[in-house]
Image (spheres, rainbow, N blue to C red):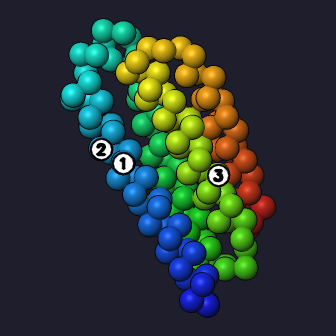
Amino acid sequence: MTAASQSTSSGTIRAGAIFGCLSVVIGAFGAHALKSTLAANHMAQVYETGVQYHAIHALAMIACGILLALKPEAKRFRTAAQLFGVGIVLFSGSLYVLAVSNVRLIGIVTPFGGVCFIAGWIYMAFAI
């Protein structure tokens, strides 16, 4: 493994770990600090969906980093991880904003994040 490929795989794993940490922090914040706000506007489930997809795709990013370390020539793992990261920001991020603000217009962004998730899984499948 070259130094560049090791750096790419460790950077991907690091990004996944940071996203994973954020999913726990954001989930705990929603469960405790935002509990009454989310209950008042019936958005707790929307928020929880954002956290769930956030955590799952953070783990997928870590898996991509590990697979990239094992197979550095498979650059699609890096692309898949990037798509997962963008998907987290667009999909989960829009759900967090929607749940807290109740501004329905932000929901327009959510499907774009979902498309990134789907594309990431397809890239990951073909990287193998």
Quadrant placement of the N terminus: bottom right
Q: Depth check: give the residue in front, 4 or 114.
A: 4
Q: Amino acid at mark 1?
A: Leu
Compare marks 1 and 3 and give the one earlier in the sequence. 1
Q: Amino acid at mark 3?
A: Leu
Q: Residue at x 59, y 43 (%)?
A: 87
Q: Is residue 45 visible?
A: no
Q: Is residue 106 visible?
A: yes
Q: Depth check: give the residue in front, 26 or 121.
A: 26
Q: Is residue 6 above or below residue 31?
A: below
Residue 110 at x, y = what percent? 60, 29
Give the Cα separation between the discs numbered 1 and 3: 17 Å
Pointer 1 and pointer 2: residues touching (CB < 8 Å)? yes
Residue 70 at x, y = what percent? 61, 80
Quadrant placement of the C terminus: bottom right
Q: Residue at x 61, y 90 (%)?
A: 2
Outermost residue toward the bottom? 2
Q: Dot 1 corresponds to which residue?
A: 22
Q: Residues within 10 Å of mark 2 (few under 14, many from 20)?
A: few
Compare marks 2 and 3 and give the one earlier in the sequence. 2
Q: Residue at x 61, y 29 (%)?
A: 109
Q: Dot 3 corresponds to which residue?
A: 83
